[in-house]
Image (spheres, helix red, strand yellow):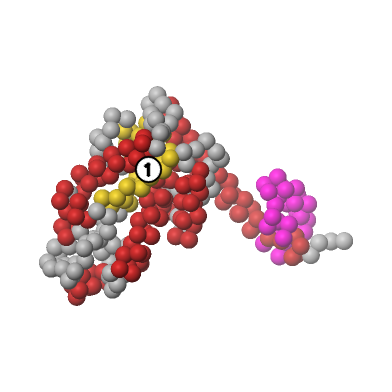
Amino acid sequence: MDLTVSEIRSKLQAATADEFAVLERSLVADTRKGVRQAVEVARRRLEAEAAEERRLAGLYAFEREMAEAHGGSVVLGLDEVGRGPLAGPLAVGGVVLGDGAPIAGLNDSKQVAPEARELIAAQVREEARAWTVQYVEPEEIDRMGMTAALRMAFQRAICAVEEAGISVDVVLLDGNPLHVDEREVNVVKGDGKCASIAAASLVAKVARDKLMEEYDVQYPGYGFASNKGYGSEGHATAIRERGLTPIHRRSFCGAFAQETLF
């Protein structure tokens, strides 16, 4: 008995690449519009899955190549989140990945849908040999400036991982040189190239976002849950109307307000 379009669609939706090749050959003479559409949908799905597998494999391959090029095997990836906001801390994530299978969906946190970030970050935290998120508070940023704050946060992250008993060979740092460690290797746009840097960006992003949501409850009216401390129009208006909170970076907010209500 011939299969219905619905039955064929179900088979194609569940087919692996090898199964699809067999199904496609068996359906070559089937001219029903629904079948042709289902075949094309399945082909695009498998092409996207294959592209994602290649992208993910590339993240891990890049990390291995960087480790080998610098004479080591244990890699610590570092990335920062929250350099530009008007409020909230700077966060730096550090991750030493485990030896298991690649973590599905791992990517630069800016490229991961918000609803998927927590799931992927949770898997990173569960499977990593070591991970940390270090903060530099607004008053420290105001006192020392952003470059010094970045150096301090990266150094704290390295120390935290080593205090967990991990001997690090190579420190892969997203962005330009900061000279925080003699093992430092800089990777421009590394969160989209290197697995451990991408993992660091995710754990830092998820942790900082959660913190800003908590601050939204503590300091209502500034939209911290949605803007995460960045200078949105609504946030700027709230500063002008309400003043600064203790979590604002005063050195970043001179154009909006000079006084605090807290």
Quadrant occupied by the N terminus: bottom right
Query: x and y percent of residue 128 in the render?
Result: 47, 41
Residue 227, located in which quarter of the rendered image? bottom left
Question: Residue 246 occupies which quadrant of the picture?
Answer: bottom left
- The rendered magenta stretch, by its main secondary structure, is classed as helix
**Residue 59 at least partly seen:** no
Front position in the image: 11 or 220: 220
Task: Identify which residue is drawn at 48% across, 46% down.
Answer: 124
Residue nearer the viewer, 22 or 196: 196
Does the segment drawn in magenta span residue 27? yes
Vertical order, 104 against 177 (above or below): below
Q: Which residues are magenta?
A: 10-37
User: Residue at the spot x=41%, y=50% of the render?
Assistant: 203
Magenta stretch: residue 181 in it?
A: no
User: Mark 1 highlights which residue?
Assistant: 94
Residue drawn at x 14%, y 63% is 254
Residue 176: horizontal and vertical position, in percent? Answer: 28, 40
Q: Nearer the viewer, residue 11 or 257?
A: 257
Q: Position of residue 172 (x, y in %)?
A: 36, 36
Q: Residue at x 19, y 69 (%)?
A: 262
Q: In the rendered view, would you say 65 is above or below 25? A: above
